[in-house]
Image (spheres, helix red, strand yellow):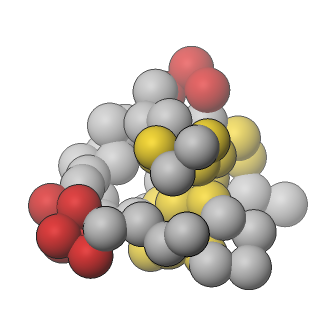
Amino acid sequence: MELNKKLLEVIACPKCKGTPFYNKKEKKLVCEKCGVEYKIESNIPIMLSEKAEKIN
């Protein structure tokens, strides 16, 4: 199942307010501006700064 396209249009990174992109393969939202990614669980993005993971 994919993320809702309207959600992707309005979602922002909680750290920098930048626009993350959806990595379909890994099922994560990635913010290149601040170098973090957010997991998606049960089709819900976990957009919490403390849960963000550094990009490798």
x and y, in percent, of residue 45 in the image: 47, 45
Q: What residue appears at the point 72 percent right and 46 percent down from the top-left corner?
A: 54
x and y, in percent, of residue 9 in the image: 18, 71
Q: Quadrant of the N terminus?
A: bottom right
Residue lying farthest to the right in this orientation = 56
Residue 25 lies in quadrant: bottom right
Q: Is residue 32 visible?
A: no
Q: In this picture, is 23 found above or below 3?
A: below
Q: What residue appears at the point 26 percent right and 52 percent down from the top-left corner?
A: 12
Relative horizontal placement of residue 15, taking residue 56 as reference (left or right): left
Q: In this picture, is 52 found above or below 21?
A: above
Q: Is residue 11 visible?
A: yes
Q: Nearer the viewer, residue 37 or 7?
A: 7
x and y, in percent, of residue 46 in the image: 50, 35
x and y, in percent, of residue 48 in the image: 46, 27
Residue 4 lies in quadrant: bottom left
Q: What residue appears at the point 56 percent right and 20 percent down from the top-left corner?
A: 50
Q: Quadrant of the C terminus?
A: bottom right
Relative horizontal placement of residue 56, taking residue 14 as reference (left or right): right
Residue lying farthest to the front in this orientation = 1
Q: Nearer the viewer, residue 24 or 30?
A: 24
Numbered disc total = 0
Q: In this picture, is 47 found above or below 19?
A: above
Q: In this picture, is 42 found above or below 27?
A: above
Residue lying farthest to the top in this orientation = 50
Q: Nearer the viewer, residue 53 or 44?
A: 44
